Image (cartoon, rainbow, N blue to C red):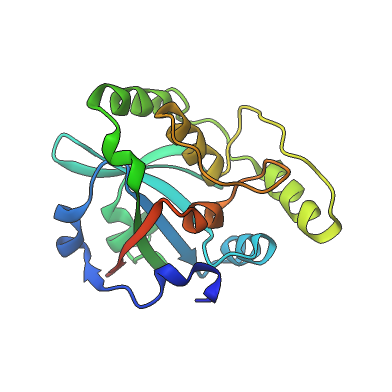
């Protein structure tokens, strides 16, 4: 991992069963994938991370609210990343980390429910492939600007969820936001790595 996200280096690695009781609603899953699309995202964003999602608890389950390429906005058990990613019977290929935004501890239950409702209202919205193209163009040619729409890359969804709680995350000068911005944010603490 590069110095770009130094706070994620040398973290304690724990199993999912060890991690699960430590997780709180609002924690951030950071993924550094070993997939073609992940490598593309990491390359064009200059980040070690290719994906982010928000952890939350519901009915004794630990879930993840996220936006992914094939499905758009979805909710999945976090354990699927560890044991059965994309119904493959194998873990996610890459590294998984948990971070926590320090301001989230001040968010009340009503606001958390509002955030989760906001996310639920966006289930099945498309993944924003056009946004990835714009980000690549911005970085490689210095062109493009983020235009809000009804499709989401993972970091846009997470950003909108946090905005519902009055929490802003740093972004680049053209309003693009990608996983690395969450990792860079000084309010985000790196907690631990989850291993299969």
In this image, 24 relative to 157: left or right? left
Q: Residue at x 54, y 66 (%)?
A: 35
In this image, 90 relative to 19: left or right? right
Q: Is residue 149 visible?
A: yes
Q: Residue at x 53, y 54 (%)?
A: 179
Corner quadrant of residue 81: bottom left
Horizontal and vertical percent position of residue 157: 51, 37
Would you place residue 6 above or below residue 171 in this image?
Answer: below
Q: Residue at x 65, y 60 (%)?
A: 45
Horizontal and vertical percent position of residue 104: 32, 40
In this image, 4 relative to 20: left or right? right
Horizontal and vertical percent position of residue 182: 49, 52
Q: Residue at x 46, y 54 (%)?
A: 186
Corner quadrant of residue 26: top left
Would you place residue 122 above or below residue 177 in this image?
Answer: above
Corner quadrant of residue 120: top left
- Which corner quadrant holds the C terminus? bottom left
């Amino acid at each position: 991992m590069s110095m770009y996200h130094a706070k994620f280096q040398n973290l304690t690695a724990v199993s999912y069963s060890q991690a699960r009781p430590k997780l709180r609603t609002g924690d951030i899953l950071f993924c550094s994938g070993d997939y073609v699309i992940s490598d593309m995202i990491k390359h064009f964003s200059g980040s070690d991370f290719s994906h982010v999602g928000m952890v939350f608890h519901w009915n004794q389950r630990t879930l993840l609210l996220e936006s992914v390429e094939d499905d758009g906005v979805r909710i999945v058990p976090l354990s699927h990343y560890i044991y059965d990613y994309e119904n493959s019977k194998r873990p996610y290929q890459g590294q998984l980390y948990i971070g926590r935004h320090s301001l989230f501890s001040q968010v009340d239950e009503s606001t958390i429910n509002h955030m989760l409702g906001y996310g639920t209202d966006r289930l099945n919205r498309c993944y924003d492939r056009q946004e990835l193209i714009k980000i690549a163009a911005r970085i490689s040619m210095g062109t493009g600007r983020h235009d809000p729409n009804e499709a989401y890359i993972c970091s846009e969804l997470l950003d909108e969820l946090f905005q519902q709680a009055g929490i802003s995350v740093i972004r680049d000068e053209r309003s693009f936001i990608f996983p690395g911005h969450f990792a860079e944010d000084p309010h985000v603490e790196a907690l631990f790595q989850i291993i299969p």
